[in-house]
Amino acid sequence: MMTKPDTTASMQAATTQWLQSAAPATAHQTEQLREVLRFHEHRYYVLNDPLIADNEYDHLYKLLQQTELAHPEWVTPTSPTQRVGSSLNSSFASVSHLVPMLSLDNSYNAEDLLDFDRRVRELSGLSEVTYCVEPKFDGASMSVIYENDQLVRSATRGDGVQGDDITTNSKQIRSIPLAAAFSRYGIQQVEIRGEVLMSKKNFALYNSKLAEEGIPPLANPRNAAAGSLRMKDPQEVGRRNLEAFLYHVAFYTTTADGLVPTTHSGMLEMLWQLGFRSPQQEKRVLQGIQAVIDYCLAFEARRDDLPYEIDGMVIKVDDLQRQEQLGQTTHHPRWAIAYKFKARQAISTLRGVEFQVGRTGAVTPVAKLDPVGIGGVTVSSISIHNQDYIAEKDLLLGDQVLIERAGDVIPQIVRSLPDKRNGTQQPIHFPTHCPVCQSQLAKEADEAVWRCINIECPAQVVERIIHFVSKDALDIRSFGEQQVRRFYELGLLKDIPGLYKLDYEAIGQLDGFGTKSIANLRSSLEASKQQPLHRLIYGLGIRHVGETMAKTLARSVQHLNDLRERSAEQLLTLEDVGPKVAASIAGFFANAQNLQMLDELAHLGLNLQQQEAAPTTGGALTGKTFLFTGTLEKFKRQQAELQVEEKGGQILGGVSSKLNYLVVGADAGSKLEKAKKIPSIIILTEDEFLALLAAEQG
């Protein structure tokens, strides 16, 4: 609750009394001590204005803890001691949100906000709209549900409809009350949306502790918060000092005499009064869109002064009845929009270049920079792609370079700064031989990439194994990149078939591998043998063969060995197989080492046969072909492709006259331009694709 002066004075007096007292003697006194602890938790974790020292709080907490141990019958579910879980969560159950957690439409400039305001005014009939503007927190989204004033469930956003149940872990976040007096407003059940954060200060402190222990630091506060929510040990979650802002009442039920606020800003005030850390102090209620634009620009200028990371502002129509009138699309509400801040930029010095070898032999230069912080992330390495890219950006060793985090996520070099050169800079020499196996590099005439063509190159072998065990390939869940590299370096693993011939006795001698972890690894490897054929084909890492092409190849054969007999000309008859793809596939199956590997995998029990059911016929999309391009924001590409296939549709690998629908996400490139030149192709936005699915389903 919001602390009143008289409440503060009485609580301070009670605090002094308890600091000088013995343990409570009755259940009533125990509850009084709990109230004192809750008061100080609120002062510390919500108001950021503590009134007592940490050791004094610890003394009161231990006093309560000792009392509850002596009198377990006095323990209540909302006691401060009940936040800390003592057991490990073995899994996170999937739970449904009371209402879907929709994404927000994005804007990047004043023109986008003006357009949003125009649509709102047209739909609402208003000449001027009252908006509530608040920070867009850069953390992990979650929802919390309270029933009869008690916290009953917390969940991650998940896919927006369902998320992971993280109730136990959320109780370790002290800015989330275990109980809140919603009944004052007549509210019986309520679902609230929020964001879990790790402050800049706590992030720096936590990383310094990791450094002392020789553990690699966490990448950024957002990842630290998201990863913490799904940790198996609740006590470790508590040690990370997470914070939570609760900013949206998504659903509620009330009694007949309920007095619930009628505006979004009123809801934030209500949450604040009930003890939540809502953006009550950061929000502004503004008349008209120009005032909104001015506030967003002013807030962006001081984003670095905040104790936590934000990546924009959220603008909402303040009146809740107007929100209901405006409604929503399948993806986002029409009454809200996110204004995204400009990408973060910084200047650093290019000190060196490392050349890394991938699974197809591609040699990628990686720039090594003086470490520089950009938006809460320390950047010291950035891919500079290929020789042409280095020339295009005019990069020299020793250059000062402008760095940007595209979308506040992926760092890239925008350009060099030639004006800052002092004559000591040196050209970057691309190697002529593989930096790992010393084989001579080769480059095809129409490509910018230099490649190591020695398929036994250790770097390629490791990358191929990593790809083989990855989620979209054989999905060997207990065996990730770190373990692959470790086993290879120790001589326990030398190739893909070696995964199924591991020396478990030797593995058992390694740190981190006990009986249970070895059993999990065995089980995952055994299960991977029965993966469908298209996953195995994709896992082989054949150049130019992605997931869609792997499905095309799998559908064309009864057994993987059938591809040994196909010439490049025969492969060209398959859907979306062009000359480059055909030559790559034919070359793979003409290589004696690859054929030996496939024979060995078959002998080890892997599935090389096409065992999938025939494509759906008679479905709503039977006979229709689809292709997705660009960055999809409203659904995962795999999920969308699966929905198409389940309804009888077919996914193509490229744009041609055989394509019926091209579904376009953000930053679509050459496929969109090519599709525009073929009149028969229907180009859909993500919303239009979802509408098509809904219409066909109906």
Image (cartoon, grey):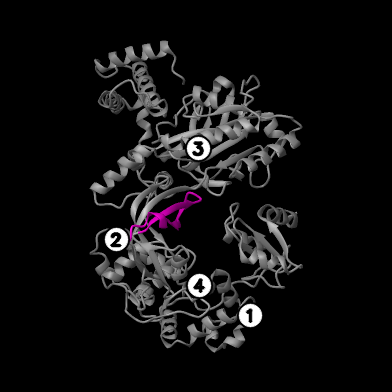
Determine whether the residue tagged by mark 3 lies in a helix, strand or loop. helix
Mark 2 residue crowding within 10 angstroms, few (<14) / some (14–19) / many (20+): few
**Residue 660 x, y percent position in the rendering:** 72, 67
Q: Nearer the viewer, mark 1 or mark 2?
A: 1
Tell me the quarter of the picture where residue 553 sits. bottom right
Q: Position of residue 497 (x, y in %)?
A: 38, 77
Q: Are marks 3 and 4 in contact (CB under 8 Å)?
A: no
Q: CA distance from mark 3 to mark 1?
A: 52 Å
Residue that carries the numbered disc 4 in the rendered image:
538
- Closer to the camera: disc 2 or disc 3? 3
Q: Which residues are magenta?
A: 399-424
> Camera-side residue: 500 or 450?
450
Dot 3 or dot 4: first in sequence order is 3
Q: Is residue 376 magenta?
A: no
Quickly name the residue at label 1: 574
How much space separates mark 1 and mark 2, taking CA atoms? Answer: 47 Å
Neighbours of disc 3 within 10 Å: few (<14), some (14-19), many (20+):
some
Q: Which residue is mark 2?
A: 515
Q: Secondary structure at mark 4?
A: helix
Q: How far apart in space, not on screen, are marks 3 and 4 (Cα)?
A: 44 Å
Task: Give the numbered dot on residue 300.
Answer: 3
Quadrant of the rendering where the C terminus is positioned: bottom right
